[in-house]
Amino acid sequence: MQETLKRIIRDVPDFPKKGIIFKDITTLCKDPVSFQRTVDLLGHRYIGKNIDLVVGIEARGFIVGAALAYKLGAGVILVRKSGKLPYKTHKAAYTLEYGKDSLEIHTDALRKGQKVVIADDLLATGGTAKAVVDLVEKLGGRIVECAFIVELNELKGRERLHPHSVFSLVQY
Ligand code: AMP
């Protein structure tokens, strides 16, 4: 299955800037069998673990996060780029493979002690996911795992997220 998913994820060289090979999951998402399989594989990992909430990271993490939450019968909460969320927020700055930004979560997005899975399409340096970990922890959430479709091993995002558990469906 790993190989099938790998084949369907499109490489876009030099996007969004020279030297980056962008792993484009839109080719996976538009294929009904691959998309369903992806969500099922992630879902089976967390079924029975009493996950309260899945955190989706803007923007492709919303697709993975919402589908996974539905599968688990959990809620979905959003972490968005600065200035997008309407209510009171906490903010965390982060760096990514190709730039800098900041992310926000609603101050009432989760209650202390709730069990969450953090979901995104791809783990590169881990800067984005680490910012989300910090936001979830600030609100007292219990992070069960950070889940990704793709992991770029070379960039060592997994180490950056230590001691949190990391799971990915395909690695490069
Ligand atoms: P990082 O913070 O370095 O782990 O970067 C992860 C975030 O940036 C995720 O939200 C990804 O969607 C995006 N991203 C970083 N590098 C790539 C890449 N090579 N291909 C696709 N998305 C990427």
Image (cartoon, grey):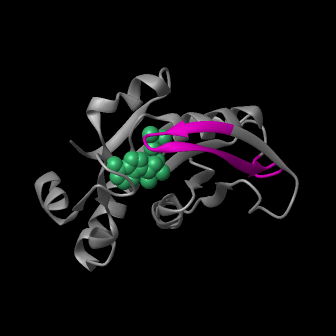
Q: Is residue 8 left or right of residue 64?
A: left
Q: Percent x, y for residue 154? A: 27, 30
Quadrant location of the C terminus?
Answer: top left
Q: Find out whether residue 36 is within the magenta segment.
A: no
Q: Residue at x 54, y 41 (%)?
A: 128
Please, is residue 150 above or below residue 146 in the view?
Answer: below
Q: Percent x, y for residue 100? A: 58, 42
Q: Is residue 157 left or right of residue 88?
A: left
Q: Residue at x 64, y 34 (%)?
A: 142
> Which SS does the magenta portion mostly show?
strand
Q: Residue at x 56, y 54 (%)?
A: 57
Residue 46 visible in this rendered orientation of the protein: no
Q: Percent x, y for residue 112? A: 77, 37
Q: Quadrant of residue 102?
A: top right
Q: Quadrant of residue 85?
A: bottom right
Q: Find out whether residue 94 is within the magenta segment.
A: yes
Q: Residue at x 27, y 33 (%)?
A: 153
Magenta-highlighted residues: 93-110
Quadrant location of the N terminus?
Answer: bottom left
